[in-house]
Image (cartoon, rainbow, N blue to C red):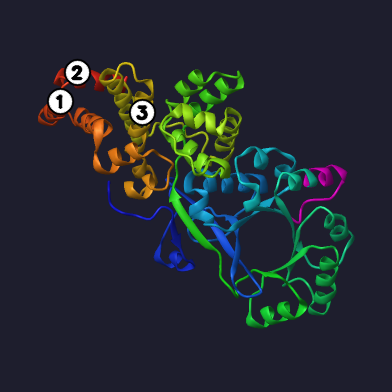
Amino acid sequence: MNARAPSPSLIGDQSASHGTEATPESVYLGRQPIVDRNGALNAFELLFRSDATNPARVTDDADATAQVLARLVGDMGLSAALGDHTGYLNVDRTVLMSDVVRQLPLPPERFVLEILETVTFDEALFRRCNELRRAGFRLALDDVSQVSRRLFAFLSCVDIVKIDFMECPRECLAELVSTVKRHGKLSLAEKVETRQDHEAAMRAGFELFQGYHFAKPQVLTSRRITPSRDALLRPMVVLNGEPGIVELEAELKRIPSLVVQLLRLLQSTASVRARTVSSMREAIMLVGTRQIARWAQLLLFADGDLDALRTDPLAQLCGARARFMELAASQLRPDDVRFADTAFMTGVFSLVHVLFGSAIEDIVTTLPVRADMRRALLERHGDLGLLLDAAEAAESGDFAAIRAACDALPTFTPNDLIMLGLAAAR
């Protein structure tokens, strides 16, 4: 369970030849570098991928965008997928006109929304594009191959124009780039496949470049963390009724895997990235109930197997352990509610590395948990560490381990730990 494995890992195009196959427990995200005139990495375009073999099998643009967002924010994390760079995200009209992108806590300065060629221009879209730009997003127009009425219609409400190098005649490149620059927009040459393509694009005056000449799309892979449909519906129903923090906290504690995603969500929010949290309540207050509701909705939309309502035994174990630690912490320090909250979260994170298929050190060091929680998880230090030992002893049913845990925590008898384990399981 503690075997070290990268999370997420990077799989090159060669992975297909080694028989790597998608599994229901894994999620995939493609990314292709975008470079500047000096060859320096400028950004990544994020791409939907259904498996590690790297083909783009997109049948629904809105669904593909939702899955990219779910994998980026929830399963992999913004820093793991993008580092410090900008992400280009494909959007169709449905996504542009919805609140999916704006309501998630994505730092807008980190993203370029790439308007697909299927999107038609009208006054409503014009207003929406300007709203998104005022919110801090940049917009790019995709798959341009000629000076056209559509290009002129979009120029006033985008920041970047992506020109398809395979479709645009070479003799038209200079005019097209000049038109884009006259309107104060950046020009990006996409599908630059050869050295000759790159040289032609440089001569034409392009500022950004993307294509197989620089790098083929890479595939990031991570373990999927998907709360069941029923489990997600519960907090959504509660959220719909404008709940208090206590009520929402109780619902979220039923879904340990969603707790993990909530913390990932928190980490992707620029304004609170440097903060640490020690309780579910604190995380809820930092993220906000509206953001949590949006995230639950996106998870429902992005889940590829909504009808497979099955119980994940690992998630059940995680929930029972977290509840055990909360109950035991309340008994150890009856007047310290904050300590009980912290104990619950410590229980969740003690198993989260298994969900991600990684080492616990890889997960704990990338999430905003307090120092005492981190030391409990990595070193079994302090009361939290002793409670974690007690939880594992109760799970094992090993009486010698249970007695040893009680020796370290004289507040408890072996019978206490056994009864707490049963209560937590219930």
Could you say which is closer to the camera, residue 277 or residue 207? 277
Question: Height in image: 214 above or below 50?
Answer: below
Residue drawn at 86 percent across, 47 percent down: 122
Q: CA distance from mark 3 to mark 2?
A: 18 Å
- Callout 1: SS: helix
What mark, if any, has residue 406 been given in the picture? 1
Q: Is residue 313 visible?
A: no
User: Is 123 inside the magenta-drawn segment?
Assistant: yes
Q: CA distance from mark 3 to mark 1?
A: 19 Å
Q: Quadrant of residue 24?
A: top left
Residue drawn at 59 percent across, 56 percent down: 47
- Indicate left or right for 419 with 242 as reference: left
**Which residue is denoted by mark 2 in the rendering?**
416
Question: Can you name the residue that lies furthest to the left here?
Answer: 400
Which stretch is magenta?
Answer: 115-129
The amino acid on which the numbered mark 2 sits, given as a three-letter code, is: Asp
The amino acid on which the numbered mark 1 sits, given as a three-letter code, is: Cys
Q: Say whether disc 3 or disc 2 marks the residue closer to the N-terminus.
A: 3
